[in-house]
Image (cartoon, grey):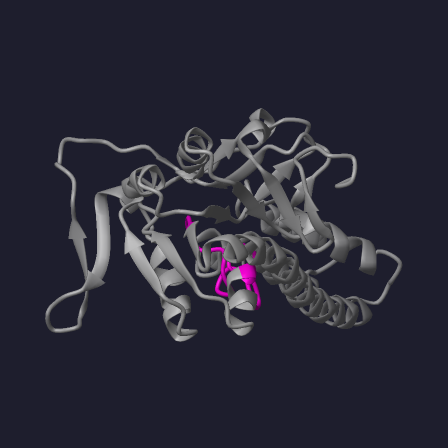
Amino acid sequence: MVSAIRDMHVRGAPLIGVAAAYGMHLAVKEAKDEQDLTRLSAILRNARPTAIDLTWAVDIQLKKISQLNAFAEKAKTAFSNAELLRKESIQRCRQIGEHGYLMLKEIAKKKGSVNILTHCNAGWLACVDYGTATAPIYVAAEKGMKLHVWVDETRPRNQGMLTAWELGEEGIPHTIIPDNTGGHLMQVGKVDIVIVGSDRVTANGDVTNKIGTYLKALAAKDNGIPFYAAMPTSTVDWSMKHGSEVPIELRSEDEIHYVHGLNSESKLVRIKLTPDKSRAENYGFDVTPARLVTGLITEKGISKPGDINLI
């Protein structure tokens, strides 16, 4: 499970949290004693530094099993609680969708349809079902709303392609765009709202999300377009006051140097894009200041960043 999280076979804050919960079940089964369990849980906790849901899930599991002595009972309880967290995650995402749908409905009343810009993948592939940023889209589509989604490719790992695949499977109209296109689309009136996910929101409402989110928020602010971040309340880190405190993951240069894809024979190939003498720096996330965020969509409703109602 550590490898799956670290190497991004599973990714997205809610899914990382649920995966970590099951990972704790595996850790209990593997641990030789309490000291070893502490060691394994620390390894799991440190698999990725930015997404707070990972730490949240590990801490919940440790608290749940702390009163039990027998490791067989600990393992059984850790598994049943992971199942509960999985089901709760689905419900939270559905509720995020319901709250966000009401906001999209207001736009649709005025314009007849809604053009939404997304960044990265905050859909059901990044959660367990519905997603966070995509949840309002899926609920709106269920209810027959006319909408279209602009999907950022999200270099260097191209998670936007996952969003595009999801939307295609759901029959939702969408268009993949290069990361640098969003600002232009906003200028020419082709974007009504920006909705992104988040890996950690600090107490003042700063939003940490996939690298490139900050630029979209700046463009949205300049063009008077609402910018929302969607996340379960488990993604809010009240221990951190400002986004400057969030550890930003620095990933392998190879994610920039190489791209994977299908060739003309439908075989998966790895191609080098960059000059041999050039180095790369690969930051996984950036922080969007609360002043650029119109609102936060959670399972409990929509709040302004840092609003007492969110607390």
Stretch in magenta? 118-136
Q: Is residue 138 magenta?
A: no
Q: Where in the figure is residue 11, as x and y percent of width and height?
A: 49, 56
Count of numbered tags: 0
**Residue drawn at point x = 53 percent, y = 31 percent:** 292
**Residue drawn at point x = 48 percent, y = 51 percent:** 6
Q: Is residue 134 magenta?
A: yes
Q: Quadrant of the N terminus?
A: bottom right
Q: Quadrant of the C terminus?
A: top right
Q: Where in the figure is residue 79, as x and y percent of width and height?
A: 71, 70
Task: Say if residue 208 shows up in the picture.
Answer: yes
Q: Is residue 300 above or below residue 168?
A: above
Location of residue 268 by image quarter: bottom left
Q: Residue furthest right?
A: 67
**Residue drawn at point x = 16 percent, y = 40 percent:** 274
Q: Where in the figure is residue 69, as x and y percent of width and height?
A: 87, 63
Task: Say if residue 36 shows up in the picture.
Answer: no
Using the image as rendered, state which of residue 12 and residue 167 is in the foreground. Answer: 167
Q: Is residue 241 above or below residue 71?
A: above
Q: Is residue 108 above or below residue 236?
A: below
Q: Main secondary structure of the magenta part?
A: loop
Q: Where in the figure is residue 114, as x and y percent of width and height?
A: 45, 56
Using the image as rendered, state which of residue 165 and residue 218 is in the foreground. Answer: 218
Location of residue 90 by image quarter: bottom right
**Residue drawn at point x = 54 percent, y = 38 percent:** 208
246 lies left or right of 32: left
